[in-house]
Amino acid sequence: DAAGNPLLGRAPHLRFYRDQVNSKRRVLALAEPSLRLQAGVGPRLDFTCFYNGHNWRHTALGFGWTHSYEIRVVPAWVGGARQVYLLWQGDYLLGPCDTNGYLAVFGEQARLLEAADGSWTLSNRTHDVYRFTEAGQLESIADRNANTLALALAGFAGEPDLRVKKLVQCTAPAGAGTLAFDYAPNSARLRKA
């Protein structure tokens, strides 16, 4: 947008002054920027941690916690029909997509398409492109000028057939920086970034 904020960025309801604690629904939602590297061009390297009290998954950061690159495509069968959802930062379920692949991402129209190889592509009105693996994991973010933030994924030790991988590295466009992730031995638990 005009202020330089990412258009498919943090959800408006994750700001600290509104809906941080919802006692009626018994939920706590937090977003805290942890590591930020301003690249010269393209998507910036921004590792933000999110806590959602209604989070139903156990991730590398622990139960209830996710991070800014924990964005997933989730195909599901609902009422005998295949529906495609987007699991956004902080584990907010968006969707389903309509028959043409369009869905609203916090009020902004985006299009999510499945390729013949099973991978996915999400594009928005500013021509940012999010690419996902066939397992639905985010693998890159590119802007309209093809400046790409690349995410390196690796399998878990002793689990060669597991389709979901762990995030091991984020590389900013034009060699502006790299963020590496270290996991506990024989575990999916993130130790440090």
Image (cartoon, rainbow, N blue to C red):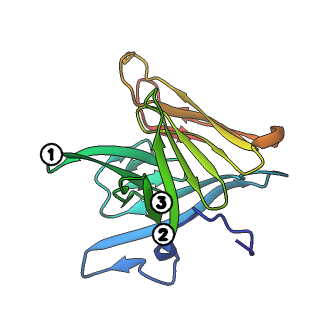
Q: Amino acid at mark 2?
A: Phe
User: In the current view of this chain or complex, which residue is farthest to the left?
Assistant: 79
Q: Amino acid at mark 1?
A: Gly
> Nearer the viewer's eye, disc 1 or disc 2?
1
Residue under label 1, please give it. 80
- The image quadrant that residue 126 belongs to is bottom right
Q: Residue at x 52, y 76 (%)?
A: 15
**Which of the labelled discs sits on residue 50, or is there none?**
3
Which quadrant, please, contains the C terminus? top right
**Residue 147: x and y, percent?**
76, 44
Asked if the residue under mark 2 is in contact with the one under mark 1, i.e. CB atoms within 8 Å, the reply is: no
Left/right of residue 172 with respect to residue 8 in the rendered view: right
Left/right of residue 119 with respect to residue 181 in the rendered view: left
**Residue 102: x and y, percent?**
45, 57
**Residue 170: x and y, percent?**
65, 39
Q: Is residue 24 above or below residue 162?
A: below
**Distance between the Cα atoms at labels 3 and 2?**
17 Å
N-terminal label among 1 and 2: 1
Residue under label 2, please give it. 106
Q: Residue at x 48, y 64 (%)?
A: 105
Q: Amino acid at mark 3?
A: Phe
